Every structure is written in structure tokens, then in C-alpha cells.
Image: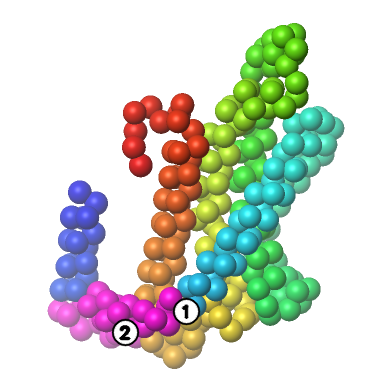
Amino acid sequence: MTFIFITVILILWELSGRLLNIPEYILPLPISITKALIGNFSLLLSHGKYTVLAALMGLLAAVLFALIISYFMDKFQPIKKMLYPLLVVSQTIPIVALAPIMMIWFGLGIAPKVFTVALVCFFPLSINITEGLANTSRDEIELLKVMGGTPVQIFKHIQLPSTLPYFFSGLKISATYSVMGAVIGEWLGGNKGLGVYMIRSMHTYNVSNLFAGIIAVVVLSIIFFKVIELISWVTMPWDRKGEEV
């Protein structure tokens, strides 16, 4: 049904654009965008590699930092009471406002892009991991302690299975945010990446190429999401409920 719906939208878009004679620099037709995708495929691939690298590095940094912060917030309630409100408040700051500061601090290389991605991805990960740890059954933990369970065994058999669904829920959100964060960083400075490709297309009023860049970003985000979904499906066999990826 989704495929049929998208096909109908594209056909209506094409027909209405031709009938109304909408200029290409305002709204290019799907056929023009398709030609731009094919004609610029190697260029999109070259810029896309840089965006993927920044997104992956930033996502990895966000995962590591979120795990550390969430662990300490779960173990020490004063830390949670102190940091949790700050995490929420941090989301009220537009990432576009912070990205220029990252450029000033780290220059125009890949570092500010990675930092921007990490900032974007950190919040959903830390909140979900913290909630997962908080919702772990305390009765089961106490029972395993009475039975002589070690901290490693408690983590492996109780905390890890309980927290993984929350972790992957946050990771799916962060995975799609990571591409967006990398592109935002590239918009504000740099010479490589899909964000740079899109800015150059905009400055030359080549809207077909701009739409091609947008499609490339969307495709990358979907790929990231599906990869995380597959890893989640493989990692948590107890949570499949008969579903297949």
C-alpha cells in the first residue's frame, strides 16, 4: 500500500507540474530529480561516505557517553536528580545554534560534525537506557543476590535483558538523528559531505540536485534504522514475538 501511495503522489506531482508549468528552480519534476540522482550518483556516493563516517563516529561516541552517564544515574540517585533535569533542558537548545560554536572550537574538519552528531544522539539514548535500568525488577536482583549471584551475573541475567529493549529503542531514534546531525554540521562548514553538496546545489539554484541530496539523506537514515532494527532482532531473540525483520 505504501508503494502504491508513493507512486500515485509522484504521478500527480509530475502531471500537475507539467500542467501548471511550475519552474524547475521552484519545484522540479520527479523525472528531473531521478535524472539528477543518476547523473550525480558517483558525486553523491563520494559525499555520502564522509557523512556516514561522521554519523557513525558521532553515534558511537553518544552510545559510550550515554552508557556511562546512565550507569552513574542509576547507581547514584543524587547524580540522577542533578543531571536528569539538565538533560531535558539541553534539548531546548537548537542544535543549529550550537554547531557554529563547535566550528570555532574544533575547526572545519570532521571533529565538529562528530561532536554535533553526538549531541543530537545522546539525549534519546541516555533517557532510554536510564529508564530501562530503573525498570529492572528489584525483586529479581535481590533474589539473585540471596542466591549468591555476583554483580556480573546480576547484570548479565537481569539488568541486560531488561534494558536492551529500551537501549535499542533509543538507538533507532539516534541512528536516524545521526545522519541529520552530520548534515547540519556540514551545512555550517566543511568541504565534503551531503550537507556541503546540498548547500552548493542551493547556491546554484539547482533544485533537482538539492532534492537528490535530500533523497540520499533519507535513504541513509532508513538504512541506519534498518541495520539497528536487524541488530536488535538478532540480539534479543526473547523479544521477537514471532516477528521477522
Crowding at dot 2, Cα within 10 Å, few <14 / some 14-19 / many 20+, comes out as few
How far across and how far down the image is residue 102, in percent? 73, 70
Which kind of residue does numbered mark 1 sit on? Ser
User: Please, what secondary structure does the residue beneath circle 2 have?
Assistant: helix
Question: Which of the two discs, 2 and 1, sits closer to the camera?
Answer: 1
Task: Name the residue tied to disc 2.
Answer: 39
Which quadrant of the figure has residue 79? top right
The image's mark for residue 46 is 1
The image's mark for residue 215 is none
Above or below 37: residue 97: above
> Which mark is first along the chain, 1 or 2?
2
Which kind of residue does numbered mark 2 sit on? Gly
Above or below 184: residue 150: above
Residue at 19% x, 74% y: name it: 14
Which quadrant of the figure has residue 41? bottom left
Magenta-colored span: 17-45
Above or below 133: residue 115: below
How far across and how far down the image is residue 166, in percent? 56, 35
